[in-house]
């Protein structure tokens, strides 16, 4: 197949992990005979430096005509002045909005080779296989905003349409898994959550009668995610709750650097990025874990390009490399020197053959 893929390396460790991801993607193309046209674009702080805008028009048009977009990460101290006219993170929100990628899928599956990298006991980590379905283009991140020197507001709003379409995606995915949906909200306090819960109670039994639906408050969910993570199958939730819950969930897998994400729109065109940020504390040191980026590319092969075999090959290769002891500092083994970002990339490429 032929596909046009936009590469947005971004800021901080973004370009470092993207370099290894692109090498792996090119190797997959060579092995499978697919033709991936890769075009670079600017976003975030790098785009602000070059153009004054966090999501320039050139990047927007490139992304809109691509089959998929790969993103490293955006942001960093250089652009973090709260009074700045434009911030890198706005570029990311504009990108998500431009592509209308409302469904953010974040798989969280533990792997025995990484039990030792998690702060949780191994017995808690056994059989953890969660798919978090996070609503990505609504809620407080996209609502009306206002700030004066003495007050501020971020309006959290959701429409029936926005809630229904994300619940439908969660239902479809749960039907292909173990058949359980946990809908996470704060319905004891928030009106948006009460609407969310009512719609879930209508839609899931009507459209997915075979699924088990449970509701959970976000505060309880953060606790149960640590006390009994294996009891979850699909978690569906709104934008900010999903953002926070998946950073917490990443520690089940040992490190934020291991977790990929896929953000899909109605046409299955997608944005693929690791869940981590630009990690300014380790940027430029060649020590970031590139696995989350490489695994995001596997999700792109699966969801936007329909290349399941290639996706599975990439995923198996990443975990085989980790099992063989190739570990960056964030998941390193006691007494074993960690390897660099690039050497981790080399191990994955070598595993692909
Ligand atoms: N999607 C995105 O682009 C995105 C997401 C979150 C945060 N951000 C931005 O990133 C910047 C830094 O935010 P933060 O520090 O809160 O979050 P972060 O995810 O960048 O880092 C949190 C911690 O995890 C570590 N870490 C993250 N990714 C890693 C990797 N691949 N390998 C090893 N360790 C890794 C970091 O070193 C840091 O200690 C901010 O400007 C923030 O707005 C961007």
Image: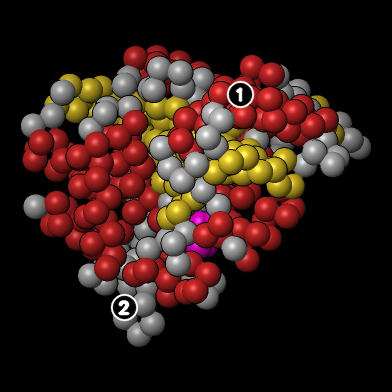
Q: Is residue 251 magenta?
A: yes
Q: Which residue is mark 1?
A: 206
Query: Does mark 1's beta carbon lie closer than 8 Å to ligand 1?
Result: no
* Residue 266 x, y percent position in the rendering: 46, 18
SS for callout 1: helix
* Residue 124 x, y percent position in the rendering: 53, 69
- Residue at 34 percent across and 14 percent down: it is 65
Q: Could you say which is closer to the camera, residue 44 or residue 137?
A: 137
Q: Residue furthest right?
A: 150
- Mark 2, Cα crowd under 10 Å, few <14 / some 14-19 / many 20+, is few
The image quadrant of residue 150 is top right
Q: Is residue 270 above or below residue 277?
A: above
Upstream in the sequence, badge 2 or badge 1?
1
- Residue at 70 percent across and 43 percent down: it is 215
Q: Horizontally, is 192 left or right of 322 in the view? A: right
The part of the chain drawn in magenta is: 249-254
Q: Is residue 138 magenta?
A: no
Q: Residue furthest front?
A: 210
* Residue 213 x, y percent position in the rendering: 62, 40
Q: Which residue is mark 2?
A: 337
Q: Could you say which is closer to the camera, residue 108 or residue 68?
A: 108
**Can residue 19 be seen from the camera position used here?**
no
């Amino acid at each position: 197949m032929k596909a046009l893929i936009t590469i947005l390396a971004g800021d901080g460790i973004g370009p470092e992990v993207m370099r290894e991801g692109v090498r792996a993607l090119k190797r997959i193309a060579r092995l499978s005979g697919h033709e991936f046209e890769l075009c670079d674009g600017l976003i975030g702080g790098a785009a602000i430096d070059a153009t004054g805008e966090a999501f320039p028009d050139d990047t927007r048009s490139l992304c809109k005509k691509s089959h998929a977009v790969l993103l490293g990460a955006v942001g960093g101290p250089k652009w973090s002045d709260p009074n700045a006219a434009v911030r890198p993170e706005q570029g990311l929100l504009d990108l998500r909005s431009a592509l209308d990628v409302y469904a953010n899928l974040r798989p969280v599956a533990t792997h025995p080779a990484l039990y030792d990298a998690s702060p949780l006991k191994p017995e808690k980590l056994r059989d953890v296989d969660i798919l978090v379905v996070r609503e990505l283009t609504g809620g407080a991140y996209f609502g009306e905003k206002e700030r004066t020197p003495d007050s501020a507001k971020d309006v959290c709003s959701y429409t029936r349409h926005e809630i229904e379409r994300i619940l439908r995606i969660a239902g479809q995915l749960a039907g292909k898994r173990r058949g359980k949906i946990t809908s996470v909200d704060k319905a004891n306090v928030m009106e948006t959550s009460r609407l969310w819960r009512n719609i879930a109670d209508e839609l899931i039994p009507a459209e997915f009668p075979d699924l088990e639906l449970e509701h959970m408050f976000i505060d309880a969910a953060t606790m149960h995610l640590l006390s009994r993570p294996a009891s979850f199958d699909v978690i569906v939730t709104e934008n900010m709750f999903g953002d926070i819950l998946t950073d917490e969930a990443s520690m089940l897998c040992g490190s934020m650097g291991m977790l990929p994400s896929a953000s899909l729109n109605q046409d299955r065109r997608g944005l693929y990025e690791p869940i981590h940020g630009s990690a300014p504390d380790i940027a430029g040191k060649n020590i970031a874990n590139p696995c989350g980026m490489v695994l995001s590319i596997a999700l792109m092969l699966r969801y936007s390009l329909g290349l399941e075999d290639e996706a599975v090959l990439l995923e198996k290769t990443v975990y085989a490399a980790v099992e063989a002891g190739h570990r960056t500092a964030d998941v390193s083994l006691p007494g074993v020197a960690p390897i660099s970002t690039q050497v981790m990339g080399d191990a994955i490429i070598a595993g692909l053959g």
